[in-house]
Amino acid sequence: KPRLYSGMQPSADSLQAGNYIGALLQWRDMQSSYDAFFSVVDLHAITVAQDPAVLREKTRRTAAQYIAAGIEPSKSTLYVQSHVRAHAELAWILSTITGFGEANRMTQFKDKSSRFGADATSVGLFTYPVLMAADILLYQSELVPVGDDQKQHVELTRDLAERFNSRFGETFTVPTPVIQKETARIYDLQNPTSKMSKSAESDAGVLWLLDDPAKSAKKIMRAVTDTEGSVRFDRENKPGVSNLLTIYAALSGRQMESIEDEYAGRGYGDFKKGLAEVIVSEFGPVRDRANELLADPAELDRVLATNAAKADAVADATLADVYDRVGLLRRV
Ligand code: AQP
């Protein structure tokens, strides 16, 4: 089976609907056809300020939500990034073949650092894409499902893999990004032209996977729409309604047209009520399962440890090869 790698940052207590629809549902569907590695990327999460105890908890919670959403730890390798030391080690090696100018062209760093200011921006945030390259290359991944904001980072990963291979001999598989479909991209309910995000400034437009269903329903009822009153998909002119339709179709597994037909001639109120029901019935069981898993953290930690050992085996082999090829003296 072809190798696949993807990950998510443990940057909130709960994942949001975009993470679920845009990442977890796709991962779940891909896990049977691929030898998949899914990581909770805690080393990435510490590139911005965070609280240690809270980070630990968020890491467990993120892993629990992967499993609750249907990522099976017996099928896929589901692990915590920091449990596999090779990530940090390979990132160092790759940083030595990354041009400063090349890293400096990464637009995500430019966006984030301009928000934080120079003094609050860490070198780790700058080298974030190099760590991401290490994540992907360690497993000789062929495919990397990502949102299009990560495309530039996967391009850098490809460049680094090719550069290393041509300088030191064939070592890495050059990965291909699998860019998320537009129908899997979810926008903020209050501001439907920007993507839904865990770290949105306001919580009002974010649907949390683990939230109380009544709260999620309320957020849907208050979601921004338009004055036209007809339920139809038109991303440009009706971003709010189009976003709700996208969520509806993704969670119910129905075609967009059949939903448009069902609500033809009915108001947004009915449509929103229907969507709220879909959300409650889809998120409810995921939330219950995640809570069950979190009620036994020792068992969850054991599952993560077993999976980290599986990841270690693959990652260590790649790293040993890399150390040899760059000329580091073998410890006997
Ligand atoms: N709104 C979204 N629609 C579809 N997919 C989304 N993803 C995130 N938001 C949406 C996908 O979820 C995964 C999460 O990746 P991440 O945790 O590394 O960070 P992110 O993409 O920056 O997601 P967030 O929720 O906005 O997190 P923060 O606030 O921490 O930056 C990726 O596969 C992404 O495509």
Image: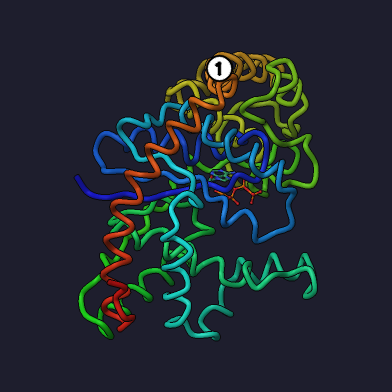
Q: Residues within 10 Å of mark 1 (few under 14, many from 20)?
A: few
Q: Which residue is mark 1?
A: 292
Residue in the foreground of this view, choosing between 227 and 70: 70
Left of 108 or right of it: where is 145? left
Above or below, 321 against 53 in this view is below
Point out residue 245 in the picture as x, y percentages from the top left corner: 56, 30
SS type, badge 1: helix
Residue in the foreground of this view, choosing between 225 and 192: 192
Is residue 163 something that shows in the picture?
Answer: no
Point out residue 154 in the picture as x, y percentages from the top left corner: 42, 64
Left of 92 or right of it: where is 139? left
Point out residue 157 in the picture as x, y percentages from the top left corner: 40, 69
Left of 287 or right of it: where is 134? left
Q: Residue furthest front?
A: 332
The residue sitting at 26% across, 42% down in the picture is 34
Above or below, 5 against 130 in this view is above
Name the image quarter holding the N terminus. Answer: top left
The residue sitting at 73% across, 52% down in the picture is 50
For disc 1, does the CB lie below 8 Å from ligand 1? no
For residue 208, what is the image quadrant?
Answer: top right
Point out residue 226 in the picture as x, y percentages from the top left corner: 73, 34
For residue 87, what is the image quadrant?
Answer: bottom left
Amino acid at dot 1: Glu
Is residue 214 something that shows in the picture?
Answer: yes
The residue sitting at 26% across, 79% down in the picture is 325
Residue in the foreground of this view, choosing between 230 and 75: 75
Name the image quarter holding the C terminus. Answer: bottom left
For residue 30, what is the image quadrant?
Answer: top left
The residue sitting at 63% across, 67% down in the picture is 125
Left of 218 or right of it: where is 94? left
What colouring does the structure picture have?
rainbow
